[in-house]
């Protein structure tokens, strides 16, 4: 039986010192298209399987709580990626978005050689409607 995308992600988080508060749970739930339909969003391509979602295990969690701690070395950025020497620094705006997209693409191309492969494999493959790209 193949290892699920969620198991790979959670193993990667553990190996990279990412702490997830026990009051929340990361789990597979339906598929991306079903979630899109249930929230009245639309995705531009078909689903590729179960969605990875985060759920609260408590009715109310104080907003001052940190639910996930991510060490700096686990963050994929233009400064930490394989192509960091080739990406021009852009602090904000469209240039910053494009630089980060290039950083992510470079790591995707590296496949299992990427430090972030366990995380990257968990990302949706279809287009996801994100507000920052609406305008």
Image (tube, rainbow, N blue to C red):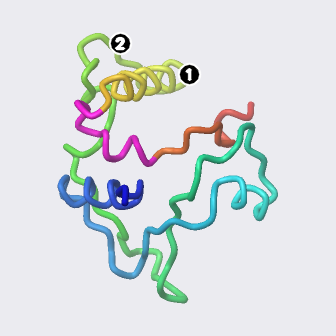
Q: Residue at x 28, y 18 (%)?
A: 83
Please state if 95 lies on the left or on the right of 76 as rendered: right
Depth check: give the residue in front, 6 or 26: 6
Circle 2: element type: loop
Q: Residue furthest right?
A: 40
Q: Residue at x 44, y 48 (%)?
A: 122
User: Which stretch did the figure color magenta?
Assistant: 112-122
Depth check: give the residue in front, 80 or 29: 29
Q: Judge whether residue 88 is colored magenta.
A: no
In the picture of the structure, the residue carrying the numbered disc 2 is: 88
Specify few, some or many for label 2: CA neighbours under 10 Å numbering under 14, 14-19, or 20 or more: few
In the picture of the structure, the residue carrying the numbered disc 1 is: 94
Please state if 14 lies on the left or on the right of 87 as rendered: left
Instruction: Establish if 88 lies above or below 22.
Output: above
Circle 1: element type: helix
Specify few, some or many for label 1: CA neighbours under 10 Å numbering under 14, 14-19, or 20 or more: few
Instruction: Establish if 135 lies above or below 67.
Output: above
Instruction: Establish if 115 lies above or below 37.
Output: above
């Amino acid at each position: 039986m193949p290892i699920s995308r969620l198991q790979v992600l959670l193993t990667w988080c553990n190996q990279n010192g990412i702490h997830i508060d026990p009051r929340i749970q990361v789990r597979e739930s339906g598929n991306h298209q079903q979630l899109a339909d249930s929230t009245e969003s639309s995705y531009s391509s078909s689903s590729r399987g179960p969605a990875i979602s985060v759920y609260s295990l408590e009715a109310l969690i104080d907003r001052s709580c940190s639910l996930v701690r991510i060490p700096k070395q686990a963050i994929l950025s233009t400064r930490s990626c394989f192509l960091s020497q080739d990406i021009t620094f852009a602090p904000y705006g469209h240039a910053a978005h494009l630089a980060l997209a290039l950083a992510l693409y470079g790591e995707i191309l590296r496949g299992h050689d990427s430090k972030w492969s366990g995380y990257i494999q968990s990302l949706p493959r279809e287009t996801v409607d994100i507000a920052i790209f609406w305008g």
